[in-house]
Amino acid sequence: MKQVVQNYKSGELALLDVPVPGCKADGVLVRSAYSLISTGTELMKVSEAGMSMLGKARSRPDQVAKVVQSVATNGVPATYRKVMGKLDSYTPLGYSLCGVVEQVGAGIDDVKVGDLVACAGNEHALHAELNWVPKNLYAPMPDGLAPRHAAFGTVGSIALQGVRQGESRLGEVALVIGLGLIGQLVVQLLTASGVRVVGVDPDPARCELAERLGAAACGDPESAAVESAVAELTDGHGVDQVYLAAGGSSNQPVELAARLCRDRGRVVDIGKCRLDLPWNAYYEKELDVRFSRSYGPGRYDPAYELEGRDYPIGYVRWTERRNLACFLDLVARGKVDVEPLISHIADFDDAVETYRSLKDGELKAVAVLFRYPEQTVEAEAPAVTVPEVKRPATAAAPARAVRTPVRLAFVGAGNYATSMLLPHLAQRDGVELSTVVTTTALSAANAQRKFGFSEATTDLDAVLGDKSIDAVFVVTRHSSHADLTRKALLAGKAVFVEKPLALTEDELAGVLAAVEESGNDRLQVGFNRRFAPLLLEARKRFGARTGPASLRYLVNAGRLDHGSWYLQQGSEGSRFAGEGGHFIDTASWLLDADPVSVYAVAPSGNEDLQIVLGYPDGSTATISYVTTGSPGYPKETLDLVADGKVLRLDDFVRASVYGRKRWVSSRLPKARDKGQSAELAAFVKAVRTGGPMPVPLESLVATTAATLAVQTGLAGGAPVTLAGAR
């Protein structure tokens, strides 16, 4: 299928061939009929992409701050790779469309194949021939509504949420500053609510359009006609509410709002304009400044948008989805007329040229629609369980032809895969990147372009059934790791799965059952720190020990950004369950044993954990996993004490050993090397030669069981014995 994409580094726009997205549960696969270009938001993104690197930095100071923090935590080289990897990737455009349901996922019962729906979301209602849309981001179309009009659903919801924030009442007077697409819709929604509207825009054509659609008067912000109209309609008191639907860097809109608003009036920011509030003007009138957050309640909440958890109507009357349905109903009943807003309808095949014309100013438009081909093309089949492949219990590693490259497939191509794994594999001799599989088409296409995969697809079954593929990398969200690993093992593949291997004891048991059934134990979990060159050298310098050891590991994990999928504990497990295996594995490797007991405590009110691991020889490892520390402090520090010796690791940039002789590593290594490259080299070698996996399966299982025991210990408030531990 085709999708509109942009490279934020170069500014390139393209109509790219990408795989069809899979139809997951709790959502539908929708074939686009019309999608709407947001001439405000999207053109701003297109313009930013064409800026120099300095210009991009100036336009996004929030992202610059994140880069600075990443440098402090991860070092310049790792941060540079991460940032440039993100910049030099295709990003999608679009967030408002109408289309036909082509496939229905499990758990969906309100629509069926062939139904027309309006869809929202900058990750799900893209300018693409097919999109997977979760339940709370689509709404069935009312009877009689034209598909091209339903494509306005998302921007209509944005305007509607802004009007709701203004709490308009019958008989009031409102000022709408900015008569672009959102502003024109706000004018109509206010008029339909019994509010008289004055519009402001420097474009006479947009002012004329707004008056035709119901505004009492419109004019240039510099025109005395606007102030005269406000004075006449309000008896000189000023408007009851102001809607800022303008963009740009001028502070004129907020200054005009203060001048024309009545005492204790309301100012609602819907667009993205400069907001240097003149203190005296806003203070003297005690103006109520409000923000309207996109489509409504539910926006930016993964539990609502991705997991389909609705808010009770008794507590949240107008959610994101209810706003979408309400706007569609208003258009269907003729209360809002979007037809006059349509300046141009372009064939989807002409998408790149259409964007260029809009950016260069050749095409003057309020709203532009893409029209998609009407022919029906069957979507690729969704992933299903691969038939089990039974092997003798004594099966050896699959034989490989001499000198043939190791053929790898990746399931998942997110940030970690593309910044920490694929750069190492793409440069390695004797490796062929065969196929990348994702549920979102564009991430697969990005990985194919950047790293040279032979094929990009959303069909997992085809990969598992391809006998020429030697190994599968599972680099997806945590909740899918165990199931994908089990399927790949049963298909006879060597498997590299990023941590965690499993989120529950049942999932871990399922993986082990697949090993037993297939006889295939070719498994590696991404516990990379034991492969870090600096830690390997420090361990060698420390030497063998004779007595019990005491190990302290401080992990200054820091807080996650709001909206991070790591916070979705209901589906993805706790944060420690996701990444704690790294630290347990490192401790066990340094102590050369698997833990036999786990004791965990957590202060109330935060995610900090104190975990004590016991080992067979009396050694202990204490892991302090904290989220409340300073972001300027190193992320990982470790001390190992035994036999009159001390090993110290400072965040993989410096290590030292104190004993009869003192050894200190170089202070300034080229980069933090946490062992990914060496780990991948060891895994590829094992696949190529048929030799043992880099880490014994028993160790991977013990580390996973100990990680899961942390949650058990927290719930029970007592130490947990790991039954059967070696």
Image (spheres, rainbow, N blue to C red):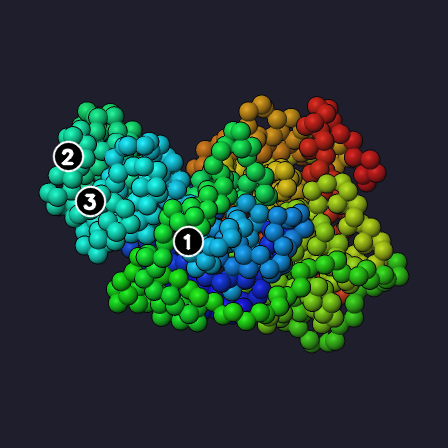
Asked whether 578 or 173 is in front, the reply is 173
Cα separation, mark 1 vs mark 2, equals: 34 Å
Tag 2: amino acid? Ala
Please report contact status of discs 1 and 2: CB closer than 8 Å, yes or no: no
Asked whether 559 or 436 is in front, the reply is 436
At a point 22% along the width and 43% down the height, the residue shown is 216
- Counting residues from the N terminus, which is met first, the one under dot 1 or under dot 2? 1
Q: Is residue 378 above or below residue 337?
A: below
Determine crowd level at label 1: few under 14, some 14-19, many 20+ residues with C-alpha closer than 10 A: many
Q: For mark 2, what is the residue?
A: 231
**Quadrant assignment for the C terminus:** top right
Asked whether 176 or 195 is in front, the reply is 195
Which dot, 3 or 1, sits closer to the camera? 3
184 left or right of 646 in image: left
Cα separation, mark 2 vs mark 3, equals: 12 Å
Quick check: can you spot residue 279? no
Image quadrant assignment for residue 505: top right
At a point 53% along the width and 33% down the height, the residue shown is 313
Q: Is residue 452 above or below residue 338?
A: below
Q: For mark 3, what is the residue?
A: 217
Tag 1: amino acid? Phe
At a point 22% along the width and 37% down the height, the residue shown is 257
- Counting residues from the N terminus, which is met first, the one under dot 2 or under dot 3? 3
